[in-house]
Amino acid sequence: MSAVEVEPTVAAELFGDRIDLARQFTDALAREGEERGLIGPLEVPRLWTRHILNSVIAAPLFHGSVADVGSGAGLPGLVLAIARPDVQWTLIEPMERRITWLNEQVSALGIDNVEVLRARAEDARRAEGFDVVTARAVSALRTLIPITAPLVRDGGELTLLKGLNAANEIEAAQKQIKKFRLSDVRVEVLGEGVLPETTRVVRARVR
C-alpha cells in the first residue's frame, strides 16, 4: 500500500471537534479503499488534500435534508455528514459493494444522521424532495442535472462539487438548465488561501 498523506494542519480547523471521526474514516479508506475498489491506486498519497479536504470545505453550504448522488466511497457524503451532524444525509449509491462499505462506516463511526440508500438516482425520488442535492465526480453537468434536479424540492438547491472545467460545463448544459428550471446557476470557488487545492462548486436554485 502507498504511504498515506500526512494530515494537513488545516484539517483539524475544518472538522473542529469532529476531527477524530474524520481521521478514523480517512484511515479506513486509506487501508481498504484501493483493495475494495473504492479509490484508485494513486489516491492514497493525496487522500486528505484531494478528497477529504476537497469535500469538507463545502460543509457550510448545506442545510436541512441532503442527498448525495453516487456516494461511492463516501465522498463527499460521509465526509460532510461527519462535519455537519446537524444535517440529515441520504447517501444514494447503486453498487452493492459500495453500499456495504458505507453501512460499515456509518456503524463504525457511530453517526446517526445518515441514511444509506441502494438505488439509482432516478429511483430515489421522494414526495417532499430534498433541501439540497450534491454529487462529486459523477459526470458532466449535462448528464448530472437530469438525475439530480428532480430530487430537489421546489425552491431547493443543487450544490455540485466539480473540477476546473465547471464554468465550461455550465455553458455545455444550457439546454438541461432550462429544461429543469434552474436559476442563479454559478460557480463558487472554495478554500482559496486555506487549502492547497481549491474546490469548485456549481450551485443553482431549482424551481
Image: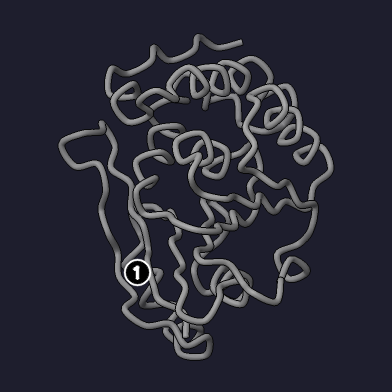
Q: Amino acid at mark 1?
A: Asn
Colour scheme of the picture: one colour
Quarter of the picture holding the N terminus: top right
Residue corresponding to mark 1: 168
Look at the picture and state if 192 lies above or below 155: above
- The residue at 26%/33% (across/down) is 195
Farthest residue, direction left: 193
Q: Quadrant of residue 157?
A: bottom left
Q: Nearer the viewer, residue 37 or 29?
A: 29
Horizontal and vertical percent position of residue 58: 37, 47
Look at the picture and state if 104 lies above or below 97: above
Left or right of 39 in this view: 164? left
- The residue at 72%/31% (across/down) is 37
SS for callout 1: helix
Left or right of 171 in this view: 65? right
Horizontal and vertical percent position of residue 19: 43, 21
Look at the picture and state if 31 lies above or below 25: above
Horizontal and vertical percent position of residue 154: 52, 81
Q: Quadrant of residue 147?
A: bottom right
Horizontal and vertical percent position of residue 34: 66, 24
Number of labels in the image equals 1
Q: Nearer the viewer, residue 93 or 90?
A: 90
- The residue at 43%/15% (across/down) is 5
- The residue at 54%/55% (across/down) is 135
Farthest residue, direction right: 96
Left or right of 17 in this view: 23? right
Q: Residues within 10 Å of mark 1 (few under 14, many from 20)?
A: few
